[in-house]
Amino acid sequence: MFKINDNYLKLPGSYLFSTIAKKVTAYKESNPNNKVISLGIGDVTQPLAPAIIEAMHKAVDEMADASTFRGYAPDLGYEFLRRAIADNDYKSRGVELALDEIFISDGAKSDSGNIVDIFAQNNKIAVTDPVYPVYVDSNAMAGKTGDYLKDRECWSNVVYMPCTAENNFVPELPSDTPDIIYICCPNNPTGTALKKSDLQKWVDYANEKKAVIIYDAAYEAYISEEDVPHSIYECEGAKTCAIEMRSFSKNAGFTGTRLGFTVIPKELTCDGTSLNGLWARRHGTKFNGAPYIIQRAGEAVYSKEGREQTGKQIAYYMNNAKEIRNALEGMGYTVFGGVNAPYIWLKTPDGMKSWDFFDVLLEKANVVGTPGSGFGPSGEGYFRLTAFGSAESTKEALERIKKL
């Protein structure tokens, strides 16, 4: 008789965004005449930039010609894209990477879930709290988080590093030494980012404790402050302790086309074993990479036209973030974020529970947001709004919230 992976049975409820989708669907079915505006899931709304579309059309034509047809992508991804990444995302910032240190994938979410495969069962993970739930969920599915403590809404074998208003949402070095440290910067959901001096402390800590940092830089394109690094490898010593993940979803609108990459430097080793080599083996066995057409689209992001066009989209979303932040502050809400990331993090009014505030917004304003408690214990009493909607729908949502 077949067996179920009982680690899945320990997972509480459903995935955060699945729960939101079910609630919204039920509300729409009961209230078909009400127009619901979503400022919840971090999905982009602007169409792919013309330079990207042009590259995709050209790649489609190549696939229609026997002389230029491409089959399976190379294990690590096409060299043209890895070179574009190395030159534009890293070399331009003073970071030298070998092409075989860059692994192309279908997105940072997939890599976040898959990276746990190369680490032993008895590793203890640490996460900033609140943070993107995929990190903890992926480790829970692999049996690496211990037991779920329902009364505390946390896992027994996870080190939670609170990021609250009291510490300006900057995590403190943990007293309980972890083996694997997840850092999302700029952070989802709080929208805050670590200054280079703060990030350097984490790099030094990881090297001292022989821990590894899994650094999610999916929102680096939204950084506006000069003292916030775009890559952890801008910090001294990071290549010996850090894995970096990137995504094209938010910087170029690839949420519907899926493209990302992970960087694992060859200097990163454990007892003489290269993590780069382990990931290459795992990557080559279980994943064929993103399709040729999508990788050509990714290359186009780094063209002069691509940079200009995607830059305008980023500015568009960040203007939405500014509008949301200013409007909410004007209404008396306590608001954070919206400077280095397209996320607004606000305190719920009158100490209201996060899911209760979700229900109020949905039912009375027909606006969808994301309950902070879904991102971790320290997220209770907070709420996330995204700036990825259209300017028009964002303004309408704010007018509705103002009337609450």
Image (cartoon, grey):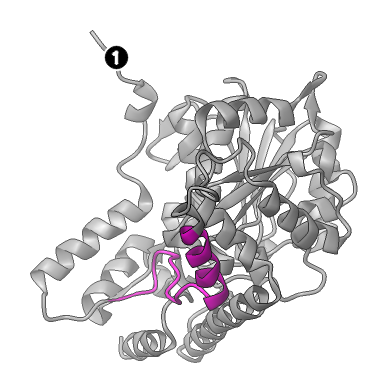
Estimate how packed mark 1 is, as few (under 14), some (14 to 19) or many (20 or more) residues with alpha carbons within 10 Å. few
Residue 213 lies, with reference to residue 321, above or below; the image says above
**Residue placed most toward the observer, 43 or 169:** 43
* Image location (x, y in percent) of residue 135: 53, 42
Q: Residue at x 26, y 73 (%)?
A: 362
Foreground residue among 214 and 163: 214
Q: Residue furthest front?
A: 67
103 or 14: nearer the viewer: 103
* Residue 301 coordinates in the image, percent (x, y): 63, 67
Residue occupying image coordinates x 44% and y 27%: 147
Type of amino acid under label 1: Lys
Write down the quadrant of residue 148 in the picture: top left
- Residue 49 screen position, x and y as percent: 53, 75
- Where's the N terminus, which quadrant? top left
* Coordinates of residue 121 in the picture (x, y in percent): 57, 20
- For residue 47, say whether it is visible: yes
* SS for dot 1: loop
**Is 203 left or right of 76, judged from the image as shown?**
right
What residue is at 45 percent from the left and 39 percent from the top? 137
**Which image quarter holds the C terminus?**
bottom left
Residue tagged by mark 1? Answer: 3
Residue sitting at x 31%, y 90%: 403
Residue 260 inside the magenta-drawn segment: no
Instruction: Tell me if residue 55 is in the magenta stretch.
Output: yes
